[in-house]
Amino acid sequence: MQPIENTGYTALTILSKANRFNRWMYEAIKPHLTDNVLEIGSGIGNISSFILQDFNTVTLSDIDDFYLQKLKTNFQQQSQVSEFLSINLQMQSFKIVYKDLKEKFDSLVMLNVLEHLPDDNYALENCKFLLKPKGTLIILVPAYKFLFSRMDKELHHFRRYTAKSLRKKIAAQSFQINKSFYFNFLGIFAWLYGKIFKLKVLPSSEMNVFNRLVPLGRLLDKIVFQRTGLSTIVIAKKISPN
């Protein structure tokens, strides 16, 4: 069995070795998570492993059967995992196909997923369907259209966002925006390097260097007050029923 996207799998494998970076990303969202978590687009579990250390009821999901098998191999023995699910936020008649998941989860986390979906508004509508009333939505996406590069194309990204554009899309689905901020200012320079040299994916050697620079990245995010960065994060609460 092969992954749907080979470039995406390569990128996830490189990121899997960047433990400092993955922990930093997780710590940016951890304060907003509550138990009974659904992770959409778990991939090979780079962030899942951290979630499972802190929460007792976690559902891991992906659209790709290859990744689902990887997740089962890596995490099936962990009692905190309640289910492994195949979830396609773009599926027609989503609410019928996934009727058993209606308003099931207290928090839904989706990291670097929304940019892959042709109809992001429909995807957000379906996220709302999966969340309990007053449930929490946590989304991280790549930031800034000017950073769109060959790497985005190779990863099958349809777009990059700003905090404002993402807030607007989420609020349109009857979510209350609790917080939004940028993440990883230092990463802008790494991505620009990749854009200038037309890279398909950041090499593992560059990611290793960046992983060692995470303490500097944390400091820089504080200095710029998280007002700019390679990614943007929005935390929102579901305020109306489906």
Image (cartoon, rainbow, N blue to C red):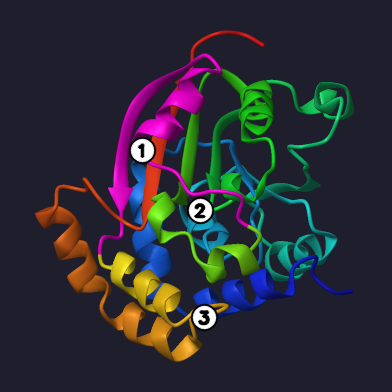
To which residue does mark 3 refer? 199
For this view, does 84 lie left or right of residue 18? right
Q: Residue at x 74, y 22 (%)?
A: 102
Task: Indicate which label's residue lies in the foreground, 3 or 2.
Answer: 3
Q: In this view, does 219 lie above or below 19?
A: above
- Do we see residue 235 in this rendering? no
Q: How many marks?
A: 3
Q: Which residue is drawn at 76% across and 70% down?
A: 73
Residue 174: % across, % down? 52, 14
- Callout 1: few (<14), some (14-19), or many (20+) C-alpha neighbours within 10 Å? many
* Residue 57, image quadrant: top right
Q: Residue at x 61, y 64 (%)?
A: 153
Is 149 magenta? The answer is no
Give whichever of 54, 160 is nearer the camera.
160
Residue 1: % across, % down? 89, 74
Q: Distance between the residues labelled 1 and 2?
A: 24 Å
To which residue does mark 1 refer? 163
For this view, does 98 lie left or right of residue 62? right
Give whichever of 144, 181 is nearer the camera.
144
Q: In the rendered structure, which amino acid carries the disc numbered 1?
A: Ala
Magenta region: 157-185
**Labels 3 and 2: the sequence-earlier one:** 2
- Do we see residue 15 in this rendering? yes
Task: Indicate which label's residue lies in the foreground, 1 or 2.
Answer: 1
Q: In the rendered structure, which amino acid carries the disc numbered 3?
A: Leu
Task: Indicate which label's residue lies in the foreground, 3 or 1.
Answer: 3
Is 162 magenta? The answer is yes
Q: How far apart are marks 3 and 2 (CA)?
A: 31 Å
> Could you tell me which secondary element the residue under label 2 belongs to?
helix
To which residue does mark 2 refer? 51
